[in-house]
Image (cartoon, rainbow, N blue to C red):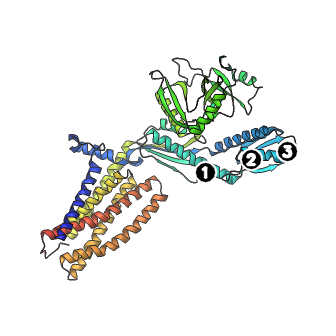
Amino acid sequence: MKKKSNLWYRTIISLVVILIGLYMVFGPSHGQFSASSFTWEGIKKNLSENINLGLDLKGGSHLVMRVKVEEYMKALTDNYRQAAFEAAKDAGLSVTDVTEVSEGNTYSFTLIFSDPSQKDAIIEAVKKKADLDNPTAPWTISSTDTTITWSLPIQSQKALAKQATEQALKIIESRINAFGVKEPTLQVIGSEESGRILLQMPGVEDPERVKKLISAESKLELMKVVSPPYPSPVQTYATKEEALASIGGRETLSRKVFPYTEREDGVSSNDKEKKPSRFVVVETPAVIDGSEIRDAAAVSRTGMPGDYQIVFSLKPTGAQKFGEWTERNINNYMAVRLNDEVKSIAYIKSKITDSGEITGRFTKESAEDLALTLKSGALPAPIEYQEERTVGPSLGADSIRAGISASIGGLIFVMSFMLFYYRGAGINAVIALLLNLLLTMAAVVFFDATLTLPGIAGLILGIGMAVDSNVLIFERIREELLAGKTIPEAIDLGFDRAFVTIIDTHVTTIIAAVILYIYGTGAIRGFAVTLILGLLINLFSAVYVSKTIFMWLLEKRPNMQRLSI
C-alpha cells in the first residue's frame, strides 16, 4: 500500500511539473486564456512572446563604441586646475596664473606664484580643497621656486580610464533599460582602460534614436547670471564678443559666456538651423549640477505637441545647498545651463529647495529623452562609434528555421535509435527526451533568459546528454537481468547504480558550462545557459520520471517475466 501511495505522489508531481512547463512555454504571456489561445496561430504567438530571442535569431543592432577616456582626463585636469587656483586665491596666497597641458599621455597643470616662501602653504591649501591625493589615482608633484606642477602618472591614467569606462557602462545600461530595449547585451571589450563597449539590441532595426540617446550629453548646471537684479531686465548681449568685453575681453575661471536662445511662442529652440539670439555671462563654479538630480520627467506646458518642459527634483544634499544659495540671492537671475547652452533664465522670487524646471518648447520625444538622460546622469566622456551592424529579421528567421530543423532532426534520429535498440523500453526514453526539451524551454522562460543560435546548439547537446543518461540506466538494468535479478530488482538497482555515474558526468559538464558563462560573451553564454538548464532538468526527466514510468508498468503487470530492454 505504501509503495502504491508513493507511486501516486511521484505521478502527481510529474504531471504538475509537466503542466507548469506546458503553460510557461505555450500559455498566454498576459496570463489570460481566450478561444484563440488554443488555435495554432495563438500557440505560435504565445510561444514567440514567452521566449526572448537573441540578436542572431530575432534580428537587431550590434554596436561597438568607445568612451573617449582622454577627454575624461582632460576635463578632470581642467577641473583640478580651476580648483587648485581658487584654493590658493581663497587662502590669500600669491598665485598669479595657472597653466595646463593635456595632450598625448601628459596631463598636468602648473600654478605660478611670486613668493617662493609660500610654496608649502600653496601645496597645503590645494590639498585641503582638491582631492589630488586620491588613493585610486594620485597626482605627482614637482616644483621650482615659483611654480608647482601636478601631473597624472600612467598608472593613475589607467585607473581613471577604467573608472570612466565602468561609469559609462552603468549609465548606458540605465538609459537602454529605461528606453525599453528587451534583453540587451552590454559588456566591456578587451581591457577596461581601453574604453571599448559592446552593445547588442535584439529587435532594434533602426538604432539611430538609441545611439543619440546613448551619446547624448546631459550636463546640467544651475548658475548665477552676471546681471543687475530684478526688476531690471536680465543682462544679455547680441554677440559673444560683446559679452567677453564686459568681463575684460576673455573668459576667466569665475566668469564664462554661453549662448542663450530666448523662447518665442510657436518657435522651437531645438531647431538646429536657428542660431542663438543672445549671449549671457554666468558665474562659475555652478551652484549645483546634474549629479544632484534625483528625478526628472517630461510634462506638457499647454497640451500642444511641441510645447514640453522638463521638471526635475533634487537630492537632499543638493536641495539644501540650492535652498541656502537661493535664499541669499533673491531677485538675482539664475540660468539653467544644459551642455553648452543656457536653456532658460529666471529671477529668484523666494527660497527654492528641491525642484526646478527647464523650458524651451521641446517636443514630447526630445523632452522624454532629455529627462531620461538627466536621470541616468552625464556620461564621464563623449562616446564614439567604431562598428555598427544590423541583423535583419529575415536572417534571424532563417537561423530559427535552421535551428529547429537541426533540433527536430536530432530528436527523430535519437528517438528512432532508442526505439530500435531498446524496443518497448525505448518509449520510456522518448518520453523523457521530449519532457527534457519542454522543461528546458520552460526554464528559459522562467529565468527570462535569451535564446540564441548557440543556445539552440546547447539544447541539442542537452538531448545527447539526456540520451546518454537513459543508455546508462538501461544498460545497468540489462546487466542486472543477466545476473539473474528479477525485473523489479533489476530496475531498482539499475537506476540506483547508474545515478552516481550520471551525477559525475553532469557535474563535470555543468562546471565547464559555468566557466563558459562567466568568461564568455553573449552568444557563448546562451549556449552555456541552455546546456546547464538541460542537464539539471535531465536529473528529473531521465531519472525521476523515467523510473515512475517503469513503476507504473510494474504496477499494471506485477508478474512481468520479460522486459524489452
**Horizontal and vertical percent position of residue 96:** 82, 37
Residue extending farthest to the bottom is 483
Residue under label 1: 162
**First along the sequence among labels 3 and 1:** 3
Residue under label 3: 118
Residue under label 2: 127
**Horizontal and vertical percent position of residue 550:** 20, 69
Q: Cα distance, mark 3 to mark 1?
A: 36 Å
Instruction: Please give left or right for residue 114 compared with residue 510 in the image.
Output: right
Depth check, mark 3 against mark 1: the one in front is 3
**First along the sequence among labels 3 and 2:** 3
Q: Cα distance, mark 3 to mark 2?
A: 14 Å
Instruction: Please give left or right for residue 315 compared with residue 16 in the image.
Output: right
Disc number at residue 275? none
Amino acid residing under circle 3: Gln
Marks 3 & 2, CB-CB < 8 Å contact: no
What SS does tag 2 mark? helix
Depth check, mark 1 against mark 2: the one in front is 2
